[in-house]
Image (cartoon, grey):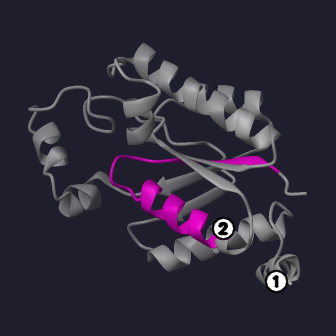
Amino acid sequence: MQKGFTLWFTGLSGAGKSTLANHLAKELRHRGLNVEILDGDEVRTNLSKGLGFSKEDRDTNIKRIGYVCKLLSRNGVIAISAAISPYREVRDYNREQIGSFIEVYVQCSIEALTQRDVKGLYKKALAGEIKNFTGVSDPYEPPLKPEITVDSERQKEEESLRTILGYLEEHGWIPHAQSSRTQAAQRHA
């Protein structure tokens, strides 16, 4: 039976949370594990429609994501949240509620995010054209003690993915790659 847990990706907009979460989910599924991703943008569309970007609305959104992650985790699913989740207090609340919780901080500087931002949102936010933009005109509180930190400014996606998988294997959250592939082959034999 698979062990359920939550991987909580946090970091600024454009840091690479969703990209890493999707690559990780693909690898975990390849290993025969059950995985669900709760992407911040998708959740806002489907589960948190009507919420704005006030602190209270952001907290409500992140608590909703946390609740779904809790349900999935306790039922043996690896839940992956890829939402900015800017406030430490709400991330800590979700950690407490879920229990089996691994925080992944996707670190990247505002300068690098501004350079790679194809939509130009950071430039607009820095110019004051966009209000309540996390990390610019609204706070982002980086985690104090994340279980995993990756630096999308300095690391290639593959390196960040290896770091995350290495941590999960080393701490017994997932089987090592070779043993999980062997188990999957045996199930299909």
Task: Check the image and report above or below for 79 versus 49.
Answer: below
Residue 83 place in picture, x, y as percent: 47, 42
Specify start and end residues of the magenta stretch as a single range.
4-29
Tell whether 166 sits left or right of 183.
left
SS class of the residue under badge 1?
A: helix
Closer to the camera: disc 1 or disc 2? Answer: 1
- Residue at 76% x, 47% y is 5
Residue type marked 1 = Ala
Between 126 and 91, the one lying in front of the other is: 91
Instruction: State the CA–CA distance, disc 1 to disc 2.
Output: 13 Å
Residue 149 place in picture, x, y as percent: 58, 59
For the view shown, which residue lies furthest in the top direction?
56
Tag 2 residue: 29
Quarter of the image with the N terminus is: bottom right
Between 16 and 146, the one lying in front of the other is: 16
Sequence-wise first label, 1 or 2: 2
Task: Check the image and report above or below for 109 versus 58.
Answer: below
Q: Is residue 140 magenta?
A: no
The mark found on residue 141 in the picture is none
Residue 66 place in picture, x, y as percent: 62, 31
| Total numbered labels placed on residues in the image | 2
Within the image, what quadrant is residue 41 found in? top left
- Residue at 75% x, 27% y is 97
- Packing grade of label 1 (10 A; few <14, some 14-19, many >=20) is few
- Residue at 55% x, 52% y is 105
- Packing grade of label 2 (10 A; few <14, some 14-19, many >=20) is some
Residue 108 place in picture, x, y as percent: 39, 58
Within the image, what quadrant is residue 88 found in? top right
Residue type marked 2 = Arg
Tell whether 87 sits left or right of 136.
right
Tag 1 residue: 185
Q: Is residue 12 magenta?
A: yes
